[in-house]
Image (tube, rainbow, N blue to C red):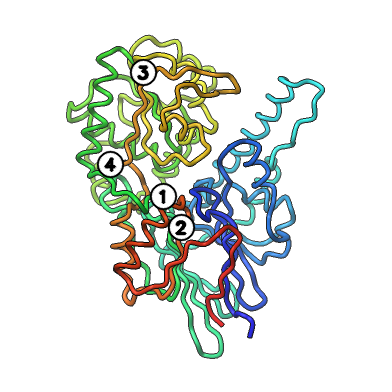
Amino acid sequence: MPSALSIAFQGAARTVTWSRHRVRFGDKSWLFDCGLYQGHREEADRVNRSFAFAPADLDTVVVSHAHLDHTGNLPTLTSQGYGGAIHATPATAELCHFMLEDSAFLQERDVQHLSRRNPGKPVRPPLYTMDDVTQTLSRFVVHEYHQPWALFEGVRVQYYDAGHILGSALTTFDFERNGARFRLGMSGDLGRADRPILRDPESHPPVDALVLESTYGNRIHPTSEVSEGLLAETITRTVTRGGRVLMPAFAVGRTQEVVATLHALAGAGRIPDLPIFVDSPMAHSATEVFLRHPELFDGQTRRAFDQEGAPLGFERLRYVATPEESKSLNDRTDPCIIVAASGMCEGGRILHHLQHGLGDARNTVLFVGFQAEGTLGRRLVDGAETVNVYGEPVRVRAEVISLQGFSAHADQNELVTWVERLSPTPRQIFLVHGEITAAEALATRLRERVPATVHIPEHGEEFALWT
């Protein structure tokens, strides 16, 4: 008998990027997330242009949150023939509006840059254009947390707060057929309790099968107190030797958390009083979306807004707008902190700051997020002595520090504890969005703690969930 319900893992299988899972139920099929693959330019371009199905054959798309490794390839899907709806939370839809536009703008700019550098040579077109983004954004349909909706006959969907970034969602799919029921849970990216700004992750109802992220499945994060202490020490040490702190950070989520933490450290006198620049128009736009959704903040952040003024825009902070203003930061001679995207140093304004700053031993490059294999950020964290920036070799003399305690992803203990709160626990668990060592370590812990069959899918592997 053919399977009534199956799932194929067509991205984020044994890697931390490129989330894309195809679900089939009866004669319907849809994608859960459609993210960009991040890595070496040639490989990324090849992977992002290809789908293991005809996009026009999809019935719909459901997304977990706005980060580009979960939504950044939606316009490619649209440009290749997909014409259906895209379901998301309201905050996710708002964030996607400018994030996808920025992604298209950067791709078109890169094509122009390569054309100037290689006159007369053919240049690959961008993955998608601004017109493709406009078409994609017109298809968003929004749903609030805890308000179930009918995806198709026999399929109901409900979002819960994942606590990862603004609008991030845990998603449950409830299937019904001939009086029988089956529930599938998708974690997307699971956040952490007691982090600045956002509410703690919720627990959705028990599920029969669970697709769970495993980014930090082999690690335990330091406590907030330890992480903030290391951050303060690193900044103070850099300022003492007359350098600047360069912080690659994702524009949505991580930048806002870092800004709130710097605000608290400065207010407590734990870091020197020095200029702090957020050099990312996208981060500025994202912060404006944050300010429109105070209902998603935790109690402490809401009180801070009421009592102290906005911790996302305090007096030491300056949002950098124009490219000229961004470049002028490299002419400063005084110590400062520059927070700029992208978080894995694969694009954005952080690149020209690295080009100018890596060679100065007084400076510090301070990472506060995961660095995927194949990225410039990963090469720096792994201790490369020379790296290519804008295609030119740059000697690394700056101090490079990685603080994992600021991650918005749950660690091994947090993931296991969250699964254990689902009672009864799932019968099957599929680990995705993690490198193989992280997924294997988490699988071992889960098999010790819960009576579930734990899978680590291969890329493209499809599983029958319910027959």
State the CA–CA distance, disc 2 to disc 4: 29 Å
Residue 148 falls left or right of residue 205: right
| Mark 3 or 2: the one toward you | 3
Residues 111 and 467: in front is 467
Identity, as a three-letter code, of the amino acid under mark 2: Gly
Task: Judge the density around disc 3: few (<14), some (14-19), many (≥20) Cα neighbours within 10 Å.
Answer: many
Q: Is residue 329 visible?
A: no
Identity, as a three-letter code, of the amino acid under mark 1: Leu
- Secondary structure beneath disc 3? loop
Q: Which mark is residue 166?
A: 1
Contact? badges 3 and 4 (CB < 8 Å): no
Q: Which mark is residue 290?
A: none
Earlier in the chain: of badge 1 and badge 3, it is: 1
Farthest-out residue, right = 120
Mark 3 sits on what residue? 363
Mark 4 sits on what residue? 305
Residue 459 falls left or right of residue 345: right
Q: Residue at x 31, y 30 (%)?
A: 314
Residue 303 falls left or right of residue 281: left
- Secondary structure beneath disc 4? helix
State the CA–CA distance, disc 3 to disc 2: 36 Å
Q: Residue at x 53, y 38 (%)?
A: 374
Q: Position of residue 366 (x, y in %)?
A: 36, 29
- Secondary structure beneath disc 1? loop
Quadrant occupied by the N terminus:
bottom right
Q: Position of residue 28 (x, y in %)?
A: 65, 73
